[in-house]
Image (spheres, grey):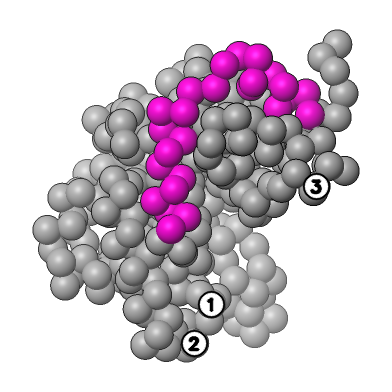
Amino acid sequence: MTTITLGKSDLLSSRLAYGCMRIAGTWNPAEITPDREETGRKALLAAYEAGYTLFDHADIYCRGGCEEMHGRLLKDSPELRRQTTIATKCGVRQQNTPSPDDPGRYDFSKEWILQSCEGSLQRLGVETIDLYQLHRPDVLMDPSEVSEAFSELHRSGKVRWFGVSNFVPSYVDLLQKSLSIPLIVNQVEISLRRLDCFTDGTLDQCLAETITPLSWSPLGGGSLGAATSESGTDPTVAELDRIAKLREVSPAVISLAWLLKHPSKIVPIVGSAKPKNIHEATLSDGSDLTREEWYALYIAARGENMP
């Protein structure tokens, strides 16, 4: 795969990222069996073999179990660390933690950010996280407090660069004003099923400020990855299928290529745990759609012609 630079940083990323949310096959770490461990390891190795270098984690994925699985692989094969740009996220607190009656919530307090980072470092078995992101906007966010936490993590060498996830442009601006280093990514939901970022200013801001958009659920929860000509009732699926057949690739490849076409340099996060799908997705890098193909898909997804 080709590589791009993430935002204004010195971090390089493969054109697609590998999303580690599903490698454990469960959200309960107690359910990680030897078979699930082996399945997850095969998925990670397939991603390395296919040329992925950016690996996306979050501390809530299997309550840290996914980070631990990746950490065990890196411990067994330390040479892989040189091929790995590690990204993980913090800020989501589970219901009933630490007290039984506590609600599920978001927490960008300095104390929680620092504590969460230490946990991720230990589970991943690394000294430095390459990209650390705030997961979902905390309405009680104090930008100066976040800045203090980020500065401490950066000075100590525990984090190289920072980003956000699911932030609207105003929240990005609000936080950036308090930071001494640039936010380099905004991880948001972008796909032919979710077009908001094209019109709400998110991708405009990414282009203007050199922030790399990372696309989670780029295949619309899987609904765009297996289009068939029998799905004629869904215009988006039908158009995907038409273009895929002409180009002799899968609808999933076309869905990803559609994202790669945008000038903001969207990095789709591929989340399949199936080695075949992980490898196949890389065909999108190089499957440059024409403007006409891109707009045909956009119009189908909009459900109406351009104004």
- The residue segment tinted magenta is 276-300
Q: Which residue is drawn at 57% across and 66% down?
A: 93
Find the distance from the CA under tag 2 to the CA under tag 3. Answer: 36 Å
Which numbered tag is attached to residue 231? 3
Which residue is nearer to you in this view: 48 or 9?
48
Label 2 CA crowd tier, 10 Å (few <14, some 14–19, many 20+) = few
Counting residues from the N terminus, which is met first, the one under dot 1 or under dot 2? 1
Dividing the picture into quadrants, the one containing residue 240 is: top right
Task: Give left or right: position of 191 versus 22.
Answer: right
Q: Which residue lies furthest to the left in this view?
A: 79
Label 3 CA crowd tier, 10 Å (few <14, some 14–19, many 20+) = some
Name the secondary structure under disc 3: loop
Counting residues from the N terminus, which is met first, the one under dot 2 or under dot 3? 2
Dividing the picture into quadrants, the one containing residue 194 is: top right
Task: Give the residue number, with chain letter if any, for mark 2.
Answer: 31
Task: Give the residue number, with chain letter if any, for mark 1.
Answer: 26
Name the secondary structure under disc 2: helix
Find the distance from the CA under tag 1 to the CA under tag 2. Answer: 7 Å
Task: Give left or right: position of 227 versus 30.
Answer: right
Q: Is the magenta stretch mostly helix, strand or loop?
A: helix
Q: Residue furthest top?
A: 307
Which residue is nearer to you in this view: 241 or 131?
241
Q: Is residue 120 visible?
A: no
Q: Where is residue 172 in the image (x, y as percent from the top left)?
A: 55, 31
Q: Residue at x 60, y 35 (%)?
A: 244
